[in-house]
Image: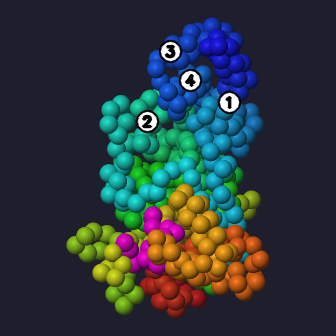
Amino acid sequence: MEQQEIKNLIDYAKAKLELNERDEGYKSNRLLEIMQSGLEGAQLEDAIYGELSLLPSETDLRFAQICKESGSKAATEWLYNYCVYNKYVKKDVLDKNPRFNTQNGLIITINKAKPEFRDPKKAKAGNSVDGGFCKCVICRENEGFGAQNKRNLRTISLTLGSLPWFWQYSPFGYFNEHGIAVNCEHTPMHIDRQTLCNLLDFVDRFPHYFIGCNAPLERIGGSVLAHDHYQGGGEVLPLHRAKIKTKIIDKKYPYVTVGILDWPGTVIRIQSEKRNEIIDIADRLREAWIDYSNVKLGIVAQDNSGVHNAISPTVIKTATHYEMNIILRSNITSEKYPDGVFHAHPEYHSIKKESIGLIEAQGLFILPGRLEQELAEIEEIIETKRALPPEYAAFKLVYEEAKALYESKKYTDIHRAMQEELGSICYRILENTAVFKEEKSLLEFLRGAGFEQ
């Protein structure tokens, strides 16, 4: 049986993983040893496909070859498919995650593949790992590290801002071809003028992808703040489809398109065919925002607990111009809102208590896997006209609003009514994250930053 399994795996590797026939015997013996090693389940699969995959250096060379011969889009398609074939990207698991669009333009996914992430202190520590040569879970030194199930991880080299970076796909990606660009040096996340340059470097090389950077602050940033990295991939997110609702004029570049986005969060869009114009305008916005306080609005730039304001930039490249969206973020807390003033408010925590990071801020919500069963039970309670039991007290708002939608006959399908309720709550969560609730306050800030109407 073992021999047949090995033959099947070798045939698969020749068909999908570019295994050279010359290495067939060698790899067969390596697989036999792995199968007899006592590894089980995910560890065994990880070891088998890591052995059958191209070496990291070979992956880099193959990617560069495809890039040269067929362009960067063909190269990223090859790499993504390769990472699916070698089982690093768990596409079969990801495809089972519920996902739907809502009438207010958001995308909602329920992530059954990973547990809820509720500890911002872990993010600051960088999710450090014990053993091996890596300092955290996204260091390049993870390639081949068995203890982290990274034997089949493959990355490709990048140069951003003349420094070495690398690109890899997320094993449990939230959207199409979700990947991360990671600094080869283990250095903390930060956003400065060079960050903006790096993001534009990335879309110059991969114009078919968007790329963005989480605000480098606890509670509103990513899950790994100790290692500089960006997130991007091959999907048009809801924020990219949003339009400018109010144009503003930059005094230095009055001809450049700048405006306040028609979006529940606080977002400024800059469009130009010239990199230097995008970078100058975005960096002035960044500098103005990180020092801005307005106690009346609950905005405090810095206090005894540290810095609280940051931007989250995200970039796409069209056929005619660069487009950078600057999302203004704050992680300030208060007695009323200990998890964050500009975070999901407590009435929504049954749906989303985790950080509202770069991806959610762009309109794609990743909700915890527990909701699939919890919401199905609430749907049944509504459909059978029962009162909400005490154990579901945290879902009172969801229950009442979904029930009202269903009973109004607007939705004859309770599941569809619940989906729209989720979309409504996620939209309100984005409104919670808006640092300026009224446009006139935002315009006042922008005037101070060198803009006019």
Query: Magenta stretch?
Result: 339-355
Marked residue nearer the N-terminal end (4 or 2): 4
Residue underneath mark 1: 65
Marked residue nearer the N-terminal end (1 or 4): 4
Of circles 1 and 4, the one toward us is 4
Is residue 79 among what the camera can see?
no
SS for callout 1: helix
Question: How busy is the neighbourhood of tag 1: few (under 14 within 10 Å), some, or many (20 plus)?
Answer: few
For the residues labelled 4 and 2, the Cα–Cα distance comes to 15 Å
Marked residue nearer the N-terminal end (4 or 3): 3
Could you say where residue 315 lies in the image, as x and y percent from the top left?
59, 61
Marked residue nearer the N-terminal end (1 or 3): 3
Residue underneath mark 3: 36
Residue underneath mark 2: 148
Residue sitting nearer the eye, 143 or 284? 143
Marked residue nearer the N-terminal end (3 or 2): 3
Image: 329 above or below 186 = below
Image: 343 above or below 10 = below
Residue sitting nearer the eye, 234 or 36? 36
Residue underneath mark 4: 48
